[in-house]
Image (cartoon, rainbow, N blue to C red):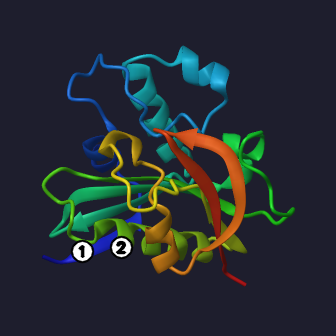
Amino acid sequence: MTVEVRPASEFEDVRALLGPKSPQANVCWCLSYRIPSKLNRELRGPARGEHVAELLRSGAPLGVLAYEDGVPVGWAAVAPRADTSFARNRKIPHVDDLPVWSLWCIRVRPGHRGEGLSHALIAGAVEYARAQGAPAVEAYPLDNGDARVDLTMAYPGLRKNFERAGFAHAADTTSVLSGHPRVLMRLDLR
């Protein structure tokens, strides 16, 4: 299989990874950290996908997609931290005032897990942020040690995968997800 990671630009490809099976279902669409919480609560069902389509049309950086032989099989959300709720999050500290980018969600389609796609997605997200002039990329993965993590709640990624990608522990957080603390990991791109 040939894996290619590139910026998300095609709505149908994004929908294949983030959209619900039923159009009326209320799923995240990776908007929870991207938009103000009031808007996040107001957008229901199909309106969530319509909002993502509008963001894509506007050219807003949403993330990257991994393709295996032309089929979308993985997603990583990455955007300037200032454009996310991480800019105001009280549980995840700011290390400094650099205009860093945040990488906060990694998703690999069932049937394609265990193939190293999360590593390719992290690398692709970093390269995309670098190409957009980001001075650093931050991630907020679970610090689970060797403990198993429910796949539904593993979306922020795992600390060990970010360490393998060259990220360093920059700060502890007070955020806990699925019983595991989250840490702030950072990769300097300067």
Asked if one can make out residue 3 in the rendered structure from this viewpoint, the answer is: yes
For residue 63, side relative to residue 75 (left or right): right
Residue that sits furthest to the bottom in the current view = 190
Disc 2 marks which amino acid? Ala
- In the picture, the quarter occupied by the C terminus is bottom right
Q: Residue at x 51, y 51 (%)?
A: 62
Q: Callout 2: helix, strand or loop?
A: helix
Q: CA distance from mark 1 to mark 2?
A: 8 Å
Please rate how many residues cluster around mark 2, counting C-alpha atoms within 10 Å: few if below 14, some from 14 to 19, many from 20. some
On residue 120, the disc is 2
In this figure, which residue is indicated by the disc labeled 1? 3
Task: Please tell me whether mark 1 or mark 2 is closer to you in this view.
Answer: 2
- In the picture, the quarter occupied by the N terminus is bottom left
Disc 1 marks which amino acid? Val
Q: How many marks?
A: 2
For residue 65, side relative to residue 138 (left or right): left
Residue 24 is drawn in which quadrant?
top left
Q: Residue at x 18, y 50 (%)?
A: 110
Q: Could you tell me residue 169's position as x and y percent?
A: 65, 70
Pointers 1 and 2 in contact (CB under 8 A)? yes
On residue 100, the disc is none
